[in-house]
């Protein structure tokens, strides 16, 4: 007659099997590769630690803004664009991750309202608070092991603040093998650089504009089409100053044109970062 295991033996075997299964699940979780993302906020802290150990020690801080951009572009235009461009730049660099977008920036006085604050939805903060936020964010990233911190500003109004913050941090970190950068090439390519590219293709200044016009709208269609009211844009009347569109007409904007601008911004910014980092 075959020997039957006692109830105690069966429970012991069941317990061992359960422990083995649990151990395998834990081991698999630790061995699982990190997701294919360069967005810091999409990682767990242990995945980020692993990425730093693997050499991803460049941190990009995309800076946008919450401001009016005419009737056809969402208030978060700069935020969506800065995130999308930073993603492309990080992947091109190969050793970079992207911090969360800074969405609160100087946009003019609140009372009385000036600049974009004259339009509903714009959010403005003082320049001093903005610079302190950038400084603390960069210091946090440096404390975790990032060796190059790059400020990428999508809006023209705070470029001087970015330069000041980067200069102060770079001086404070001198001799520690850490760099702080605010490459002007990023904004230059998205503004005058992209405008020159459009002029070379036959578009005039009366279309290109400086804010929420053809250049701005084309970049949005390429990088964040959900922020564009495309149907309304196609049938749009000629803009007036009261619409919040400056110096141009967005009606002929297209994703194909915007992609040319995006490629220009990414290539020039990557080149500027690579040129600057070996300098120390």
Image (cartoon, rainbow, N blue to C red):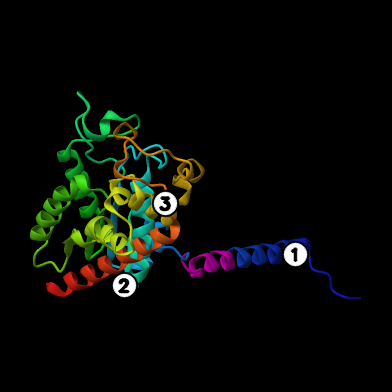
Looking at the image, which is closer to me, 139 or 14?
139
Disc 2 to disc 3, C-alpha distance = 43 Å
Residue 68 painted magenta: no
Q: Is residue 73 above or below residue 29?
A: above
Q: Position of residue 152 (x, y in %)?
A: 25, 56
Residue 28 painted magenta: yes
Looking at the image, which is closer to me, 256 or 277?
256
Q: Residue at position x 44%, y 63% from top?
A: 37
Q: Specify start and end residues of the magenta stretch as a single range.
A: 23-34
- Whether residue 183 is visible: no
Q: Pointer 3: what residue? A: 252
Q: Pointer 1: what residue? A: 10
7 on left or right of 217 = right
Report helix, strand or loop for mark 3: loop
Would you identify the image quadrant in which residue 263 lies?
A: bottom left
Q: Earlier in the sequence, mark 2 or mark 3?
A: 2
Q: Residue at position x 18%, y 50% from top?
A: 159
Q: Pointer 2: what residue? A: 55
Question: Are circles 2 and 3 on residues that touch, CB within 8 Å?
Answer: no
Report helix, strand or loop for mark 2: loop
């Amino acid at each position: 007659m075959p020997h039957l295991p006692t109830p105690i033996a069966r429970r012991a075997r069941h317990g061992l099997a359960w422990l083995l299964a649990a151990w395998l699940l834990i081991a698999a979780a630790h061995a699982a590769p990190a997701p294919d993302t360069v967005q810091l906020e999409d990682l767990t802290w242990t995945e980020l630690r692993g990425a730093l150990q693997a050499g991803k020690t460049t941190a990009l801080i995309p800076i946008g803004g919450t401001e009016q951009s005419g009737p056809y572009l969402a208030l978060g235009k700069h935020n969506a664009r800065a995130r999308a461009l930073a993603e492309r730049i990080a992947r091109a660099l190969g050793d970079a991750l992207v911090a969360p977008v800074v969405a609160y920036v100087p946009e003019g006085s609140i009372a009385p309202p000036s600049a974009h604050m004259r339009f509903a939805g714009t959010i403005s903060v003082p320049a001093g608070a903005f610079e302190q936020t950038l400084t603390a964010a960069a210091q946090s990233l440096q404390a975790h092991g990032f060796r190059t911190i790059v400020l990428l500003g999508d809006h023209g109004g705070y470029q001087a603040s970015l330069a000041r913050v980067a200069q102060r941090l770079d001086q404070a970190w001198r001799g520690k093998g850490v760099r702080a950068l605010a490459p002007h090439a990023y904004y230059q390519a998205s503004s005058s650089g992209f405008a020159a590219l459009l002029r070379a293709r036959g578009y005039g200044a009366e279309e290109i504009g400086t804010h929420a016009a053809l250049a701005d709208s084309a970049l949005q269609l390429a990088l964040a089409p959900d922020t564009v009211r495309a149907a309304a844009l196609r049938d749009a009347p000629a803009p007036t100053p009261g619409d919040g569109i400056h110096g141009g007409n967005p009606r002929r904007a297209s994703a194909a044109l915007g992609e040319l601008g995006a490629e220009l911004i990414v290539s020039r910014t990557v080149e500027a970062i690579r040129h600057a980092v070996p300098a120390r």
